[in-house]
Image (cartoon, grey):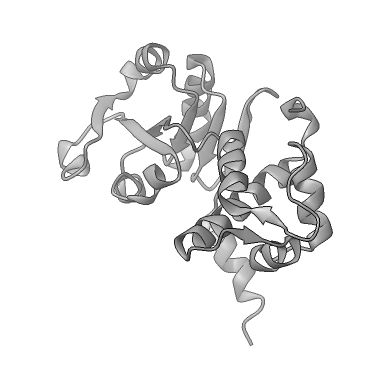
Amino acid sequence: MPSKIDIPRKSIYRLSIYQRCLSRLKENGVETVSSDALAKAAGVKSTQLRKDLTYFGQFGTRGLGYNVSQLSRTIGDVLGHNRLQPVILVGVGNLGSALLRYGGFRKEGFEIVAAFDVSPNPARVAETNVTLHNIDKLATFVNQHHVKMAILTVPVMAAQSVSNLLVDAGIQAILNFSPTVIEVPEHVVVNSVDLAVELENLSYFIR
């Protein structure tokens, strides 16, 4: 498989979409799928789907299409879904607490193994299996448990300083829910989710 640096980030994103489509096909007992059908389900052109998959090898049989289970396993290996990927969450406010209670992460191969806050409130993690720690324990935990991914749900004013702490601890990927741009070194990947911006974007299409 080519080095990750040679693979466009948008292709990696689309792999997740393909994986969800394949999961639905498996649930419905479908064993093979054509590139046209899979592309249509994913909302992309079939030429784009085939191009994305060629980064990881040759798949499918002409005239027969893709074996759903085999392609799903391969994409799962690429995305790390076939083993639980440990993730930490920093900032256990309303949004952070809600994310801790979301059951879909584990299904997709991710497990929130710990949460951190400057003022830990045990009530925020009630009815979850997630342990809550003071943020000063973060670096030690990350090192001991070999965690590489983090979810950031802290207030705007704390986002950059906490990001610096995550990077220094060895975190390589951050899912940022704080509505601000954070600066990180080139080797760290950040995906930002600004809910207000997304709603603002949708509002343009309302008539």
- Left or right of residue 39, residue 27 in this image: left
Q: Nearer the viewer, residue 135 or 87?
A: 87
Q: Residue furthest bottom?
A: 207
- Left or right of residue 200, residue 115 in this image: left
Picture residue at 35% right of the left edge, 16% below the top: 141
Picture residue at 36% right of the left edge, 19% below the top: 138
What is the x, y in percent for residue 34? Answer: 71, 62
Q: Nearer the viewer, residue 45 or 207?
A: 45
What is the x, y in percent for residue 32? Answer: 63, 59
Q: Quadrant of the C terminus?
A: bottom right
Picture residue at 79% right of the left edge, 63% below the top: 45
What is the x, y in percent for residue 183? Answer: 63, 30
- Measured along the vertical axis of the image, is residue 166 above or below residue 189? above
Snapshot quadrant of residue 186:
top right
The number of numbered discs placed on residues in the rendered structure image is: 0
The reply to whether residue 99 is in sight is yes
Snapshot quadrant of residue 116:
top left
Picture residue at 76% right of the left edge, 52% below the top: 61
- Left or right of residue 45, residue 146 in this image: left
Q: Nearer the viewer, residue 25 or 176?
A: 25
The reply to whether residue 181 is in sight is no
What is the x, y in percent for residue 204? Answer: 66, 75
Snapshot quadrant of residue 47:
bottom right
- Measured along the vertical axis of the image, is residue 114 above or below residue 9? above
- Left or right of residue 187, residue 193 in this image: left
Q: Quadrant of the N terminus?
A: top right
